Image (tube, rainbow, N blue to C red):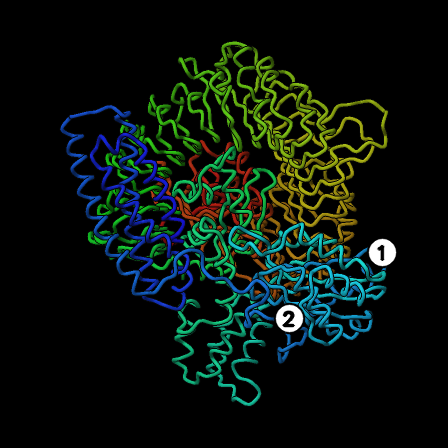
Amino acid sequence: MANALLGVVFENLMSLLQNEFSTISGIKSKAEKLSTTLDLIKAVLEDAEKKQVTDRSIKVWLQQLKDVVYVLDDILDECSIKSGQLRGSISFKPNNIMFRLEIGNRLKEITRRLDDIADSKNKFFLREGTIVKESSNEVAEWRQTSSIIVEPKVFGREDDKEKIVEFLLTQARDSDFLSVYPIVGLGGIGKTTLVQLVYNDVRVSGNFDKNIWVCVSETFSVKRICCSIIESITREKCADFELDVMERKVQEVLQGKKYLLVLDDLWNKTQQLESGLTHDKWNHLKSVLSCGSKGSSILVSTRDKVVATIVGTCQAHSLSGISDSECWLLFKEYAFGYYREEHTKLMEIGKEIVKKCNGLPLAAKALGGLMSSRNEEKEWLDIKDSELWALSQENSILLALRLSYFYLTPTLKQCFSFCAIFPKDRKILKEELIQLWMANEFISSMGNLDVEDVGNMVWKELYQKSFFQDGKMDEYSGDISFKMHDLVHDLAQSIMGQECMHLENKNMTSLSKSTHHIVVDYKVLSFDENAFKKVESLRTLLSYSYQKKHDNFPAYLSLRVLCASFIRMPSLGSLIHLRYLGLRFLDIKKLPDSIYNLKKLEILKIKYCDKLSWLPKRLACLQNLRHIVIEECRSLSSMFPNIGKLTCLRTLSVYIVSLEKGNSLTELRDLKLGGKLSIEGLNNVGSLSEAEAANLMGKKDLHQLCLSWISQQESIISAEQVLEELQPHSNLKCLTINYYEGLSLPSWIIILSNLISLKLEDCNKIVRLPLLGKLPSLKKLELSYMDNLKYLDDDESQDGMEVRIFPSLEELVLYKLPNIEGLLKVERGEMFPCLSSLDIWKCPKIGLPCLPSLKDLVADPCNNELLRSISTFCGLTQLALSDGEGITSFPEGMFKNLTSLLSLFVYCFSQLESLPEQNWEGLQSLRILRIWNCEGLRCLPEGIRHLTSLELLAIEGCPTLEERCKEGTGEDWDKIAHIPIIQKRSRVHERYFTVHPKKDKCSNSENVFWSGGGDNESGGGIEDCDFDSEGVGQSCVPISNSDHQGFMIAAVVPDRVLYLALLNVKGGGFQCFPKFWEDNFLSKVHGFVSMIDCNFDDIHFKYIEVASKTGQIKE
């Protein structure tokens, strides 16, 4: 990693020497001497990087070098900034003279320190030049593998084994071509052991004429592989023939034979591993091996997905970790053996140790072997409480992981090890990580590739080599998140040492001189005034949560990345090295003009600054800006002018059109924007040519687009004409249109073949929609506040009865459509074949067609026609019905066919007198039944006795029914006595309460129950609920409204739980929300339905579903 850092600094130093500023400032001679010293050190760095693993003195030497180089880089960066200010002209101003003196003195001191480091390298006997690698024709002995299973017992691989065996005995057996089956997984996960199991299975061995095992490892040599094949078959030492002779010999021994060849541990060729696999090498070997008979097969094991892509003739088998219980059995085998007594206390500690393995068999074996010689409880506790990398001796898991790391390029090493800054098991956003790499200058542009493209390449390579895992793409935003395996994270931490500090719920008292990157997670209680005294060059400071202002926190001048809520605005302009500035939760109306000093700034993110009204007028002078992200700054009414001058800009999340000069849509013309763009103030578009000049059609990297007019403001140009000119590129994934005043939508909407989400809000004049049902990719549709709309599709043609209508739609949300009568005017073809979630709010006239794929239905209010259609939704799992004015009974047969229903919620049917008597016996899957505020309900039906799977019955706000359900004495008690959990409450809105169901009694999918306040109080919020396994996220955010100071707990929840939250609001429960929010809250909260493991940045207090004020919430 020091190699990469030194490389960047060396480039910056060369750049300075070539700039006349070095001569003008009188520092050229000092810079030249530094260059010579760095050259001497750089010559031995590769050898030092290797030897530091086993020689702590070299590790200390490397850390000292990095600390000095960080400071040198700060000095060079200052020179670069000053050079830009002077623009090469000679200046004898006092400030410039002082700068020359100061820089000269600092360079002199750095030179002295580097000279000392250069001198001390000699005592380590470090070799110059490229390190000596293993012999090209040999594999290091500890890396050799064989076909013999050396494990005493293998755990947790039976399913994997059977899948591969099935492939070999069926699909591969019938193939006329050579089948190659790749197995991909992290080092230490058990790939070799799995292949050994398959290789030695009697069904497999008996299926082939010849079985051959070759350990390939880092060096992919066709000649050596051929030699190994010959030796395996002939059982004789292979002579060192020429390659051609050896290839012919292989074909002789394999000709006409059905063979199984294992190529274990293949590595891809990289800059650091020239001897690895390439397409050419593989094609060469494959041509030699294509001589066997039908059914011949090759099994390949590798850590690298690139290898699998090169060699595979079928989809790679991705090997995951084994379970904790299986990992424990493996650990126990090594730790206790067959004869050692199993000490009860040691077993308890051992099970905790096993959790650190996270399913990696190699880690379990390594730790088990380590514990086999330890008999004292304290020794086991010491291991349990320490990090794996801190163990006193190197072991196999670290060897395996370090080997992968060692062969990375310097850039990849630096980018990977930086990830130690994130907490373990944290979901990391790919885009965010790449921007942090950019800001720290770990990556830079390369030829025609932008720096972001280089970052994507680096990320992809680390992912392919299994340093990153669990990659997931949000199909709506395109955001990619991923994780690091805990043991891989341990490796990164062991490399970074004290360079990366993760602070969580603690006081910060002191930091090392070597601390360069800090993450503050949750709450740092205090900063000691001397905490930063030793730190020389702090580069990164990230805060992932709201923090109070800390008086002792310094405005650290060397920062490249600052993302926090405790920034002192007056000091902002002194942070001249900043590349990344993130501002959150700040009580400010404007940014200080001193931000103009941040000439190096590339990334500016401003979030949740509710009072921010405007941006500095000359922000366009920051020519290095590449990403501007502004979210939830609701008071912001205008942008800075001339944004089109920011030619490097790649992301602009918000643009506000105004009549001021330099704020028109024309500014967007030449910007190569991607990701998300929200254009507001379209009322102010002055001409159609201006709208056309925005060039949205040319922005092929835009994934999300929001077009908004200002409510109740007259437009200069017709909204319909403006929208027609704002046609985006067909790559667009998500489109939102707000406050549109046109009568119809433009025709270009239905040609957006890649559109997966469409949201129309407050488009109140629209009478009919284009034929949205023809959009092939549309998965989510949200419509709200459209008074004149009668149908989603009013096509009355009878043609094309075989056509599919809304072929991909999965989620549909309809809110405040008072005149909508149905989804389609004419039912035809295959309608909504994929629709699984339907939310209907304040659509009193709506009727529904047959929707067999529907799983979740929310309807508020309900009418009889809608209720009668429910029996046709045979796939329903969640059903929530509310507010049926005038409805005294549900239709008989309403519950017919609902055999998959898990949860039923009946709320606020004040005139409902009875529930259906029939079809309850068909609800064999029903686990939760809630009946709330149905004051007229007189009794429970007899059929409720048939609900043998029911786990929770909640009856609240139903006085007659509650009386009949009294335990032991109520007339209906015998109908419900079999139900494990029963809740009763006379009035729902008086006081909710939280129930903790028994884990073995209640399904994970319904493991959260709600509490709330009465009409004039905010009572319990979420108290200590067991959050469900499907991903309820939790974060604390401040409430800025003056009437509601303090903290709220925010939970992002699945649809079924959100529905309860919405009903609580409706019932008067959440009084901590200001009244003027309520209607907007009810509609906009839908955008946050089912967000699992949501990033904290995506939550704003306006959208928080559950809240509690004070007293019952821990900060």
In-front residue for pair 716/164 = 164
Please name the residue that numbered disc 2 is placed on.
193
Is residue 271 visible from the viewing direction of this image? yes
Q: Nearer the viewer, residue 817 or 774?
A: 774
Mark 1 to mark 2 CA distance (whole Å): 29 Å
Residue 176's disc is: 1
In this picture, residue 624 sits left or right of residue 671: left
Residue shown at 67% from the left, 50% from the top: 280
What's under tag 1, amino acid-wise? Asp
Please name whichever residue, 407 or 417, is drawn nearer the observer in this view of the structure. Answer: 407
Find residue 230 and report its horizontal and vertical position in percent: 73, 69
- Which residue sits at x=57%, y=67%? 139
Name the element at disc 1.
Answer: loop
Q: Amino acid at mark 2?
A: Thr
The image position of residue 445, as x and y in percent, is 46, 36
Could you tell me which residue is drawn at 68 percent across and 19 percent down?
Answer: 747
